[in-house]
Amino acid sequence: MTDTQKTLCLIDGSGFIFRAFYALPPLSRPDGTPVGAVFGFTSMLMNLIETHKHDLWAVIFDAKRHNFRHELYPDYKANRASPPPELIPQFSLIRDVCKTFDVPSIEMEGYEADDLIATYAHQAAQDGYKVTVVSGDKDLMQLMNSDVELIDPIKNRVLTHEDVAKKFGVLPEKVADVQALMGDSTDNVPGIPGIGPKTASELITTYGDLEALLKNAHTIPQVKRRELIQTHADAARLSKQLVLLKADVPVIVPYQDLKPKQMDYSKVINFITEQGFHRLKSRALNFFENQATPHIIAEASTLKGSFTCIQTLDDLQHAITAIQSLGYVAIDTETDGLSTSTCNLIGISLAWNTEGGVYIPIHHKNAEGVRIPDQLSLDDIRPILLPILQNSGILKIGHNIKFDAEVLANHTLPLDSTISDTIVMSYTLDMGRNNHGLDELALKYFNYSMVSYKEAIATAPRLNRKEPTFDYVSIDTATTYAAEDAWITLMLHDTLKKRLVDEKCTGLYHSLDRPLIPVIIAMELEGVKIDIDYLNQLTETFENNCKQLEHHVFQLAGQEFNLGSPKQLSEILFETLNLPNDQKKGKSGHYSTDSDVLESLAFQGHQIAEHLLSWRQYNKLINTYTRLLPEKISPKTGRVHTNFGLTITTTGRLSSSDPNLQNIPIRTEAGRLIRKAFIADQGYKIVSFDYSQIELRLLAHIADIHELKEAFHHNQDIHTLTASHVLGIPVDQITPDQRRSAKAINFGIIYGISAFGLSNQLGVSKSQAQSYIDAYFQRYPGIKAYMDNTIQHARAHGYVTTLLDHKAYIRGLEDRNYSMRNYAERQAINAPIQGSNADIIKKAMIQIFDQITKHKMSAKMLLQVHDELIFEIPEQAVESEVPLIKSIMENAAKISVPIVVDCGVADNWADAH
């Protein structure tokens, strides 16, 4: 290629999708959407953009499966299986990658991607272009010549004529002839039976091409080979028509128009972030930073801040004076860990204007672990900082401020409740729609790329530790990183405040989402007491149960094996025991043994499956709770402090992590035994307040179901009533089992349960479960209408709303994959109900906390678990404080049915629930 020769790059998008899917490990983004192939495609495209400079670019895709080859041979590609379910949602995302990087993408009805590539390559080469085809498809070896090169994107190398000869035994121009003889089982190209690649290449080398071979077949010395070729000559000619790439497709977009547009910096970074591709994000940032040809990309932000280190009391006092005159400050803390109850405060950053921020280092160390001099101590800064931290006239702004507030409180620097949080503001505006991280929001709103924690921590010495902590980061690096966080948070607060006003969300933020933050801070700081001795005994009991279940499984299997190995278990169940199985083997080469499979086998009466399910349950509870909870006890407080996520779910519900106390099984005896470990301090009681059937009450209200509303008003048993309606049996004849089935139907309908899911829950056939669902909708047609209308609204607007007007954005409603689309529809149905439930319990929590604070009540709010609030109350205060809390919860919202709260008092959570 000469220095002045123009170039065209053609990427085989369809071919790469499948190769990437099978070559790379499975990967999902935070919302569960599979993105392994998307990651591979994005990485490949970035690599090409970084390392190859081309004048013209295009990614070429197959259109629908049917094309002109099917007219020639209806069975063309007939034996190809449908794409794996995990791959289907990735097709549209890969096209989104092209849009994000502003690379043209082409597909055309009636033709395959290979034909479009051949046509564009032929046209461009004729006009003097050097053409690069990026594909691992062997068919495209036909195109290789002095003007057209082929790059394998998986192996990342240019293929040579030697590679073609190794594959087909001939040069590129003869590849189609060899393919016509040998056929292709993948594409169902017939070829000539008994002729393999070696024989085919020998024949073509001897006779020159396919037609010459067929005309002179009578001269082939081997009798069997001669007869095969003479008998199947027509099949060989047809096969060549099928394998030969069509280089004269009447393309609509001429190759000269395949020009990439300017690449938008923020669009690329936002897309990569949304998919969860953290490694690619660093690559992209480096690429944009080092790009020598700015006309190719949209410019990054010119935003610049000035970051200063404060190391004297005079400088600190000067900053505090400025903050006091303004009445607001953004604040951020740096620590040596993520547990607010155990970490050490390393430094504090502050920002009060758009020029930049300051950093106050407190406990940075040198490589020997010795505290660096010229840092202010906590004792030095405490009397200077407290006047602003405890001043209700100064707004303290943070990004996830509950973390900072808890860290500061644990270092005797408590914040008052005059706070605001940009992560919560973003969540109020975009619940279910965006990643609310500070780095991501800086890119979204300011097109600004922040210094990442990974970049900052990479500068610290490792000192034989797996991962260095922030106290070993140099003060200079820490100043830039930390002060930048406070600075961006301050500017983000102003931007989001304007959006709240513009989108009429100010009231929602200031009446619900923001006032909840101090409540959660207080709960997390309080923690909950755990009975360690009891948990140790429970671990022993569960381990014995596991051993007994193992023994039963080994007896039924006739041999010992590793119950935790999916491969070994699959072989035992479906090969050794030959249990019923209608699955296909997965990518790992064995059949699935997940809970759905085991539950189905258990329903069919296979005892080994029941034992396996029980074994898994006990094993999970041991590893998740009975062994883990004692390790989570803070040495400072002697209590467990869970982390409540305010901005994680798509419906507004709180989440719980480290440890997750919301996933303790509710309906099993084992789960009840674990709850028994959560105990009250001496002289106190655990009190549980549980909203009774709140989601069904909200369904009756939101969907306006008269019969359900009447039942709740008359305090009827809603599950017994449903059983009577669905089964056609009088209320007084409903059995406990029938009521339990109706309960599963009632709650399952809210979550959009399928007949298959309900059949597994109830232990009935799929058709019987479907008849229950049909009878339910026939009795309550308003519920079906509500579901249909809600899905329709979500499709039209992209969101659904809760009782207090939170917008819950729903993704996937237009997904091509039925499973993904169905999941999104179930989300849309459930979000208004679950989100309204979250609204009500949050409002109650705020009001209760307000009463506790104002009236100096003794009750301490410990946990919020779905529909339940757990308190620790002094024994002598139970009688006076419980009725007040119950009343607040029952009157937190006014809906068209009564809201009822059940409460229980005991020494532990299990007995109180």
Image (cartoon, rainbow, N blue to C red):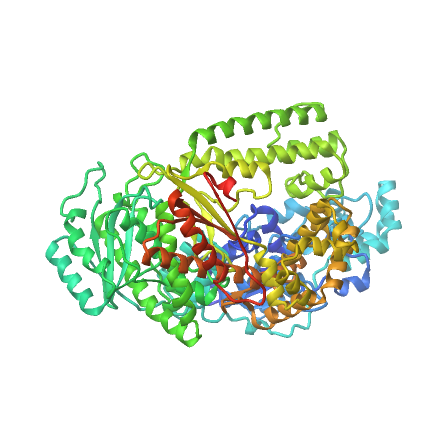
Place of residue 501 in the rendered image (x, y in percent of width and height, measured from the top left):
40, 75
Number of numbered discs on residues? 0
The image quadrant of residue 245 is bottom right
Place of residue 521 in the rendered image (x, y in percent of width and height, measured from the top left):
36, 53
The image quadrant of residue 429 is bottom left
Q: Judge by depth and name the residue closer to the eye, 478 or 722.
A: 722
Q: Is residue 67 above or below residue 198?
A: below
Question: Is residue 77 visible in this depiction of the protein?
Answer: no
Question: Is residue 508 visible in this depiction of the protein?
Answer: yes
Q: Judge by depth and name the residue closer to the eye, 698 or 428.
A: 698
* Residue occupying image coordinates x 33% and y 43%: 341
* Residue 748 relative to residue 509: left or right: right
Place of residue 190 in the rendered image (x, y in percent of width and height, measured from the top left):
80, 51
The image quadrant of residue 437 is bottom left
* Residue 64 relative to residue 807: left or right: right
Q: Is residue 36 above or below residue 591?
A: below
Q: Residue furthest bottom?
A: 502
* Residue occupying image coordinates x 77% and y 49%: 733
Place of residue 29 in the rendered image (x, y in percent of width and height, measured from the top left):
52, 54
Q: Judge by depth and name the residue closer to the eye, 658 or 105.
A: 658
